[in-house]
Amino acid sequence: MKAIAVCPGKADSAHVTDVPKPAVTDVPDGHGVLVRVLRVGLDGTDKEINAGEYGTAPDGEDILITGHESLGVVEEVGPAVKEVRPGDLVVARVRRAGGSLYDLIDTPDMTTDEAYFEHGISRVHGFLREYYVEEPRYLIPVPAALRHVAVLLEPTSVAEKGILQAYDIQRRLKVWHPRRAAVLGAGTIGLLATMILRNRGLEVTTFGLEQAPYLNSELVEAIGASYVSTRETSLAQVAARGGAFDLVFEATGYSPIVFDAMCGLLAKNGVLILSSVTGGMRRSEVPSDAINLDFVLGNKVMFGTVNASREHFEEGVRDLAITETRTLGWLSRLLTHPIPGLDRYDDALAALGEPGAIKVYVEVSPDNG
Ligand code: BGC
Ligand code: ZN
């Protein structure tokens, strides 16, 4: 069967390859689930992997099958599988368990292992292939009514984890009634974080570079949030005018903005969520005394978040459903660039950089559902 693979560490190495079709018996004791892949979304991580800057092949192999944002349909299950049935729609979790305490309790997103396992990214093959076989504990069932938008579930789970953990952390305050949230970045993660925070009833301001109106600013406004272009108005100006923010979600991919957010933007007792994976070597000079003082005197918190575990995918399913009910068609508007078939993978990579691209995804096999 066909798959898309890279040679990790080598730039522009993405290619179509032929690999054996997996079988349910590849997982011992009857626990295998054979999944036919329908759609796979791409993001900046895939771009970095194809640039040779990120990504690790499985032990003893030279290539890595890429793709981590999947949607598939169960075709066959082993005799011990009770959780899913043929015909069910599933999204696969990205991390697999390693050896740390956190892996043991099914939260590999919190692993402390140096070498961790992420499908399509690190040490395990990804989903840009016609079929994969997985254990039920790594599969999230998706309601049929969300079929057309469920390829957004993996990036949604990443935003959910950050926001749920912020609420957990804020239990330190005994009473926390966040009113104003800021989302930095209006790409896929920024838009999905805006959606989740709006579903929770917060007043949300989402910051992007581009000047409004354009698709992303229209999407922000369509769910009742406000869009601000940082070309026109700085973070500090917005905070000075309307007040500081109880929760800030950073998803720009531009690390210097973190320090601006720490100082001017975050309210007393506020929480700042960092979600950008910045693989570069950027350095910046910061007003360290002012930032430190502000954090100490304001009881502020900042934390990093990566990946997601089952509960975040499940919360993501609920938020996608709420949004489909409240603002039908909003999620579909994020699916800007469908790429038909694995053979057109080059087009998918090129589309990632195009203006107007939000979610680029490969239609791996025909979806007749
Ligand atoms: C993926 C996450 C992953 C992270 C770091 C992101 O693009 O969506 O699942 O943990 O990259 O590799
Ligand atoms: Zn990703």
Image (cartoon, rainbow, N blue to C red):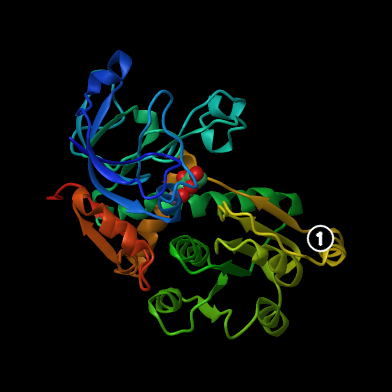
Q: Position of residue 239 (x, y in %)?
A: 69, 78
The reply to whether residue 312 is visible in this rendering is no
Front residue (pair 170, 190):
190
Residue 34 appears in the rendering: yes
Q: What amino acid type is highlighted by mark number 1?
A: Phe
Q: Say which residue appears at 38% left-offset and 73% top-offset.
A: 355
Please give the name of the residue rendered at 24% of the width and 39% of the height, measured from the top-left corner.
3
Left or right, 128 with respect to 56, comes to: left
Asked if 304 appears above or below 293 in the picture, the reply is above
Query: Residue 134 placed where, x, y %?
Result: 32, 29
Disc 1 target residue = 295
At 53% from the left and 38% from the top, the residue drawn is 109
Disc 1, SS: helix
Which quarter of the figure has residue 267? Answer: bottom right
- Viewer-proximal residue, 101 or 253? 253
Q: Nearer the viewer, residue 254 or 158?
A: 254
Q: Nearer the viewer, residue 24 or 337?
A: 337
In the displayed structure, would residue 252 be above or below residue 228? above
Residue 250 on image: x %, y % = 59, 62
Instruction: Please rate how many residues cluster around mark 1, counting C-alpha atoms within 10 Å: few if below 14, some from 14 to 19, many from 20.
Output: many
Residue positioned 35% across, 57% down in the render: 321
Q: Is residue 314 above or below residue 359?
A: above
Image spot of residue 216 (x, y percent): 42, 74
Rendering quarter of residue 204: bottom right
